Amino acid sequence: MTVGDTGGTVGGSAVAAAIVAAEHVVTPGGTLSPGWLRIADGRIAVVEPGEPPTPATHRGVWALPGFIDMHVHGGGGASFTEGGPDDARRAASFHRAHGTTRIVASLVTAPVDELERRSAMLADLAEAGVIDGIHLEGPFLSAARCGAQNPRYLTLPDVGAFTRLLAASRGWLRMITIAPELPGAPEVIRAAAAAGVIAAAGHTDASAEATAAAIAAGVSHATHLFNGMRPIGHRSPGPIGALLDHPVTCEVIADGSHLDDLIIRLTARSVGPGNLVLITDAMAAAGMSDGAYRLGELDVTVSAGVARLADPATGALGSIAGSTATMELVVRRAITAVGLPVADVAAAAGTTPARRLGLAGVTGSLRAGLDADIVLLDQDFRLDAVIARGERRHLAG
Ligand SMILES: [Zn+2]
């Protein structure tokens, strides 16, 4: 699709009081067909079935909670992993124009002092309301399953290093991805959980036993289940088997490249509607044309929309390196290609990540009292409009 500009904020207009009506309004208590909402002072004041009492300011076929992306590195040609605050603002703005009303900025593995600096910069942006938290994807990951993480900077889990990163992020560190099998992982997992940071298993070669032990220590989330993990085997269930065997939340990248849609269906059925989380894992190339990009220090080539590591000498392509997806795309595919119920997809893209991020009392559902974070989709589940904290952002065709 085409967006008016990559900043994605064209025509942003404050909606002090407005009525949103849709043929289907997806709420925690069920889908209202039709239904409507009143927005007042940036919040949802009323959600009701039927037609609104006064003409609607905005109309759509589907009204869903604004999308919440817990795992995203960039988009619109900019990223959180390199560049300055303006690049991070551009990346957040690009994704907001595609329906992501709350965003957790993901960093890739880098030297710990560099991660400290970037976490401090992102904490500034979180305080300014640009992002909603920080996710550290590394540096305590498995070299055998590092994917597009720079192996040079992988280190063994260390509570001292974690504590430095936690301090640098000034309360905005929401999640850290760890390989549970590494020595020292249980200590960092316990430290993260005690600090209210989601300990996520990912980029791991762990056995099922080691993963189950990590879950007992505090792991409560799976970073892009299946990708960057030892595969599941019928006699060696590995991390995937253990994660599916416990009530943890599981991320999936439903972009049509990272996972077969059948695998997402099986995962959704296995974890249940309250534990599936749709993410993009997008990098800077999201929304851009094919070509050469960077993910942290690594060269990435995007061809036919699929980002892969590129050998700087030979140009040979390696691991998939993040995605070029938007939440709009993964939500539409989860409904139309994977075949999940719309209400379950709304939960996986909004309600569940809100709960995991401690934002359930603020956003993630269409109910009175929460921030007016709303997406309007057409009959084909294409984005019509994004309302973020009561402010509408128009998309140009
Ligand atoms: Zn990632």
Image (spheres, grey):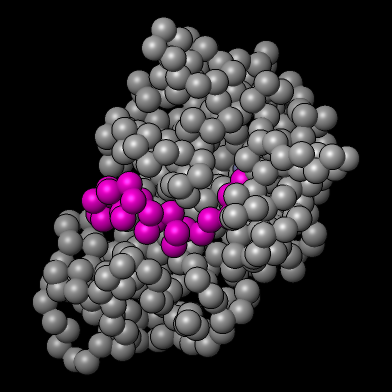
Q: In the rendered image, is residue 48 in sight? A: no
* Percent coordinates x, y for residue 175 in the rendering: 57, 40
Q: Nearer the viewer, residue 29 or 328?
A: 328
- What is the quadrant of residue 162 in the picture? top right
Q: Residue at x 40, y 77 (%)?
A: 385
The percent coordinates of residue 284 (x first, y second) are 67, 58
Give the quadrant of residue 27. Answer: bottom left
Q: Taking 223 as reference, is 381 above or below it?
A: below
Taking the view exactly as shown, the residue that stands out farthest to the left is 50
Left or right side of 286 for 239: left
- Tell me the quarter of the picture where residue 30 sits: bottom left
Q: Position of residue 139 (x, y in %)?
A: 72, 32
Please say whether residue 215 is one of the residues in the magenta stretch: no
Q: Is residue 205 visible?
A: yes
Q: Is residue 195 left or right of residue 268?
A: right
- x 17%, y 56%: residue: 29
| The residue stretch that appears in magenta | 322-344
Query: Above or below — where is 197 with respect to 342?
Result: above
Up the image or down, 61 lies above or below 270; here it is below
Q: Is-magenta flag for residue 330? A: yes
